[in-house]
Image (tube, rainbow, N blue to C red):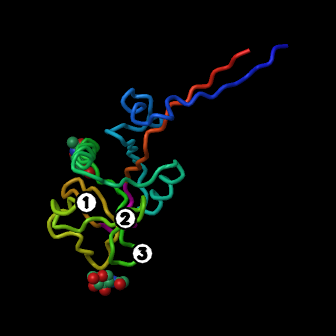
């Protein structure tokens, strides 16, 4: 009976940039790759907080929108799906400071198109209408909008591509 040795090869883990260039990184199955990011459009109709928790269970987080390319891509996907989707901005903790739930970094409040970080709030929002709107949605008609966090709709989860793993058996 031969000894069986199982080897786990991490492809190119020592050279991350090379890995990306060679395409040896992948999104989880069913997720869509856009540049350096994997997105999943979750179509279950749930509250912002429920989606936030489910993204974490998937090893991900509600989407942070970092730049215009990502934003335009997500906007097009939202239009394809003909519905509004939750993303990872909120000020539910203190009704004041908007943060990205991924890392608690501030959401740029505008004027959009200025400053280092990106935003694309629709005109006049966030307006905290009825003192009740603390979660960021990509609205089908108005794009970035603050909405009531208990609205039941889909959401966009986000994660990074992972290195490809290969199991090989020898012996
Ligand atoms: C988009 O959804 C609305 C209702 O939510 C529906 O009336 C409309 O027909 C849909 N449009 C397309 C192109 O599916
Ligand atoms: C939330 O902020 C708005 C606008 O600043 C304010 O009018 C409102 O009273 C605040 N609500 C709570 C619950 O703090």
Is 60 situated above or below 126?
Answer: above
Mark 1 and mark 2 residues within 8 Å of each other at the beta carbon: yes
The verdict on residue 134 being magenta is no
* Label 1 or label 3, whichever comes before in sequence order: 3
Residue shown at 41% from the left, 62% from the top: 101
The residue to which callout 2 is attached is: 105
Relative image position of residue 63 (x, y in whole percent): 37, 53
From the image, state whether disc 3 or disc 2 is nearer to you: 2
Q: Is mark 2 within 8 Å of ligand 2?
A: no
State the SS at label 2.
strand
State the SS at label 1.
loop
* Label 1 or label 2, whichever comes before in sequence order: 2
Residue shown at 42% from the left, 61% from the top: 103
Is 163 situated above or below 133?
Answer: above
* The N terminus - image quarter: top right
The verdict on residue 151 being magenta is yes
The quarter of the picture where residue 118 lies is bottom left
Q: Is mark 1 within 8 Å of ligand 2?
A: no
Q: Badge 2 local density, few (<14 within 10 Å), some, or many (20+)?
A: few
Q: Magenta segment, which residues?
A: 147-153
Q: Badge 1 local density, few (<14 within 10 Å), some, or many (20+)?
A: some
The residue to which callout 1 is attached is: 117
* Label 3 or label 2, whichever comes before in sequence order: 3
Q: Is mark 3 within 8 Å of ligand 2?
A: no
Q: Nearer the viewer, residue 47 or 26?
A: 26
Relative image position of residue 33 (x, y in whole percent): 36, 37
The residue to which callout 3 is attached is: 93
The quarter of the picture where residue 108 lies is bottom left
Instruction: Tell me the CA gap for discs 1 and 2.
Output: 10 Å
* The C terminus - image quarter: top right
Residue shown at 25% from the left, 60% from the top: 117
């Amino acid at each position: 009976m031969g000894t069986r040795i199982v080897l786990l090869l991490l492809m190119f883990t020592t050279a991350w940039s090379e890995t990306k260039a060679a395409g040896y990184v992948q999104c989880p199955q069913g997720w869509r790759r856009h540049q350096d990011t994997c997105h999943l459009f979750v179509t279950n109709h749930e509250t912002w907080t429920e989606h936030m928790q489910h993204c974490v269970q998937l090893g991900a987080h509600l989407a942070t929108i970092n730049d215009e390319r990502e934003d335009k891509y997500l906007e097009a996907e939202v239009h394809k799906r003909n519905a509004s989707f939750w993303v990872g901005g909120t000020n539910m903790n203190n009704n004041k400071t908007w943060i990205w739930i991924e890392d608690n970094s501030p959401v740029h409040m505008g004027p959009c198109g200025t400053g280092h970080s990106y935003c694309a709030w629709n005109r006049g929002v966030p307006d905290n209408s009825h003192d009740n709107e603390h979660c960021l949605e990509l609205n089908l008609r108005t794009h970035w909008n603050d909405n009531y966090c208990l609205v039941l709709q889909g959401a966009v989860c986000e994660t990074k591509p992972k290195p490809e793993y290969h199991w090989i058996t020898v012996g």
